[in-house]
Image (tube, grey):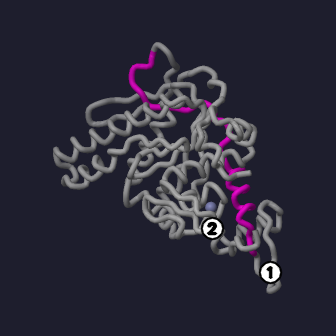
Amino acid sequence: MIDNLLTIKEVSEILRVSVRTLERWDDAGKLPAIKTVGGHRRFKQEDIDTFLGNESDKPEKTIYKHFNGLDSVSKRLNAYIITKDSVQFAFEQETGPKQEVKHLVGVDTGINALASLSDGQQLGVDVKECIERTKRCQWGSKGHGRAQRALKQRIDETAKGLVNQPYELVVVEKLGGLNKLSKVTRRVTGNIRRSLGSWNYRYWLDRVQQQCEWNRISFRTVNPAYTSQKCSSCGHTQKSNRHGENFKCQVCGLAGNADINAALNILGRFLSGTYGSRYKSLCLGETDLAGSACLDVGFV
Ligand SMILES: [Zn+2]
């Protein structure tokens, strides 16, 4: 793929690292570049994909959560939070071994649907309405509090709805950089900030992780860089592939829902990495395992 070479500046924006770091990685062989005749470094799209895939999460260990009323089943930790009307204690709870993974799903987070799944389903389609309601109310007013609670409840319900799907492994985008207001980060997460709001975004992903934990479902995250611009069939990455809610690949012509395409890319990225590669066979050539959409993932 000679036509899909990226400059060092572009790669630094995608991976959110400095140009200097990339030069170091190239010299160390961690992320090799190609040198042009003029001596400039260029990166292959596939190498970036592989690199991002390898960055996927390791299997998780115990997670700590703040929750009331777990005395009988778990061990209390030395942490607590005092709020205006309650005191929360932290507990560590053994949830038992994870279920054997037979079906995997990639999940994209968005405003049109809170969760778009790589099998083509969309959950929490009314979240936009909830968010707009909170925005209409003045911050701190009674109406705002009510709207916030309704939104939280909607997010909780959607997270529960997600773990009720027949999947033993859920891949979502990695949270991060939301607090760091670097120039690059602000641009990359700009869409999320404008639409869902970083607080809601964090709350949602935390809730999914917690639900997965309680239901013994494996939870993994991947770097979400350009998952919305990449074609899930041929891998071509271009900004103009996406037009709002619609995706149309400028090379192979694949067209469809942009969020579902992103979910396919999230799953594909996990499968192309070190920790995900052993599940690859589950998603190739087995229509009844992870749903038909899984077959279209272009990560061969
Ligand atoms: Zn394509």
Q: Quadrant of ligand 1?
A: bottom right
Q: Is mark 1 within 8 Å of ligand 1?
A: no
Pick whichever, 171 or 118, lies toward us. 118
> Of helix, strand and loop, which one carries label 1?
loop
- The residue that appears at 54% across and 53% down in the rendered structure is 262
The residue type indicated by label 1 comes to Thr
Task: Mark 2 vs mark 1: give the one in front.
Answer: 2
Q: Residue furthest left?
A: 142
Query: Magenta residues, as a range?
Result: 42-71
Which x, y percent locates residue 231? 60, 59
**Residue located 62% across and 25% down the image:** 98
**In the figure, is residue 2 to the left or right of 290?**
right
Residue 19 is tagged as none
40 to the left or right of 176: right
Where residue 65 sits in the image (x, y, percent)?
48, 31
Whether disc 2's CB lies below 8 Å from ligand 1 is answered yes
Which of the labelled discs sits on residue 36, or is there none? 1
Decide whether residue 53 is among the magenta residues.
Answer: yes
Q: Which residue is mark 2?
A: 251
Name which residue lies at 50% across and 55% down.
256
Q: Is the residue 261 above or below the residue 42 in the image?
A: above
Residue 182 in magenta stretch: no
